[in-house]
Each structure stands twice: as C-alpha cells, then as structure tokens.
C-alpha cells in the first residue's frame, strides 16, 4: 500500500537537504569567534599606541575575514589623531590592512600642532591602514571651521595631509563678506597649510579605479 506520510517525509528531507546545500553555497563562511562590546589596542615596538578599535560586535570567520558592527577606529600619529566610524566594517583578511566601511562613514582628523579638525562624511569607503589612505567614489561632504565642501569621489592621503575631491566639487566659504561659492571639477585641500586649490583636470581615471573596487567590495550594482 502507498504510504502518503512516508512520501511526505521523504520529500521534506530532500527539501531540507537542498536548502542546507544552498545556504552553504550562499554563506560559505563559518563563524569561529565573536566578541561583544570589545576594545583592542595595537602598539608599536616602543609600546606607543598605533591604533585602537572599539565596537559593539566583532565576528571572525574561518577564513579570517572579520566583521565589525559600529566600529570606532582611532589612529595615533605624531602630528594628528584620526577617528573613523561607520555602521559596519569588514576586514577581508583579518590583518588590519584594508578596512571596508559601510553606511554613515565619518572621518575626523585633528591636527595636534594647529589644533584644528576636519570632518568627512560619505556612505562607503575603503581605508588602507598601512598607507593611511581613504578612498571612495560616493558623495562626500567635508566640513572645516569656515567652510563646507561637497563633491563626488575622494582620495584622502592623511599622512601627506592632502584630500582630493574628484568630481563636481563645490565649496561654500563663510567669511566677513558673507558666503562665497567656489566650484571646480576637482578640489585639493592641503590640511598642512589650510589651502584649497581648484583643479579642473579630469579625475575620471582614479575615480573609475576606486569605483571598480568599491563596487566589487560591497557588491553594489
């Protein structure tokens, strides 16, 4: 006699097996460690602090890829302190070499000698820690004491103190005469001299290079 209950059970087992295989294909990484409300410190050979990292959650996978929720990374240099925050961050190798920042990215760089700060806001960014370089192809807003500057795409070399907006740069300056608008294709900000330079040459080559990596990294269509 045909057993309908046994037939249903077999179908259910097959479906469960297929679902499990699908999940393994879509999520090949296996979590091996989790830390909640963590804080880490990296010191150099002289025991001076190089950077600190705090966050709500750090999850490490079996391939050493690391996911961080609500990261706050601080980098200590002789001339400056840089604070970086975002909703999430991914370290693809676990080596703290490249960090992929996603959603509500905030960067604040404070010069110790000038006691001045610059703030940068964007949605996605890649931070190359060893080079102290931040890049994005997304909309960027830069705030200084007397100006607000917007543009599309940014390459910020924090060691050199040079921040380049790559396209459609627009700066609003507030001074004794009121508010002035300065526009250009590209703008370069030298944080060492507090000078802004308008550069109307094309930034397409570097912007496309950044866009390709940002798009691939965050799977943005």
Image: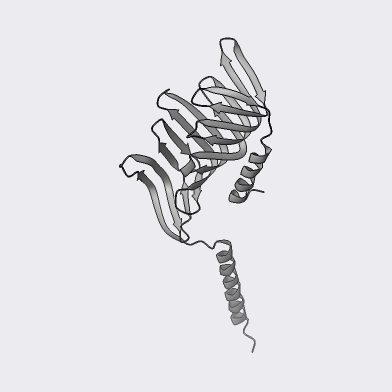
- Position of residue 46 measured from the top left corner of the image (x, y, whole percent): 30, 42
Identify the residue at image location x=59%, y=66%: 22
In the displayed image of the protein, which residue is found farthest to the bottom?
Answer: 1
Along the line of sight, which residue is nearer the eye, 165 or 8? 165
* Colour mapping used in the image: one colour
| Displayed quadrant of residue 138 | top right
The N terminus, quarter of image: bottom right
Q: Is residue 221 above or below residue 140?
A: below
| Displayed quadrant of residue 23 | bottom right
In the displayed image of the protein, which residue is found farthest to the top?
Answer: 177
Identify the residue at image location x=63%, y=40%: 206
Identify the residue at image location x=63%, y=44%: 209
- Position of residue 208 measured from the top left corner of the image (x, y, whole percent): 66, 42
Position of 33 compared to 188: left or right?
Answer: left
Count all numbered tags in the image, as a single digit.
Answer: 0
Q: Is residue 34 above or below residue 45?
A: below
- Position of residue 26 measured from the top left corner of the image (x, y, whole percent): 58, 62
Identify the residue at image location x=60%, y=75%: 14
- Position of residue 194 measured from the top left corner of the image (x, y, whole percent): 51, 22
């Amino acid at each position: 006699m045909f057993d309908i209950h046994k037939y249903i059970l077999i179908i259910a087992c097959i479906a469960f097996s297929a679902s499990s295989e699908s999940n393994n294909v879509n999520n090949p990484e296996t979590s091996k460690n989790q830390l909640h409300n963590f804080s880490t410190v990296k010191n150099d050979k002289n025991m001076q602090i190089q950077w600190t990292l705090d966050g709500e959650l750090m999850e490490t996978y079996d391939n050493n890829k690391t996911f961080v929720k609500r990261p706050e990374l601080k980098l200590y240099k002789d001339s400056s302190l840089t604070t970086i925050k975002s909703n999430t961050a991914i370290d693809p190798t676990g080596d703290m070499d490249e960090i992929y920042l996603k959603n509500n990215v905030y960067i604040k760089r404070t010069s110790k000698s000038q006691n001045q700060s610059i703030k940068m806001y964007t949605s996605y960014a890649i931070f190359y820690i060893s080079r102290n370089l931040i890049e994005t192809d997304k909309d960027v807003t830069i705030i200084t004491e007397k100006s607000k500057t917007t543009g599309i795409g940014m390459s910020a070399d924090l060691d050199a103190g040079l921040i380049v907006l790559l396209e459609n740069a627009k700066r609003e300056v507030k001074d004794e005469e009121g508010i002035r608008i300065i526009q250009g294709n590209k703008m370069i900000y030298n944080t060492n001299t507090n000078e802004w330079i308008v550069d109307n040459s094309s930034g397409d080559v570097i912007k496309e290079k950044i866009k390709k990596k940002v798009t691939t990294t965050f799977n943005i269509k």
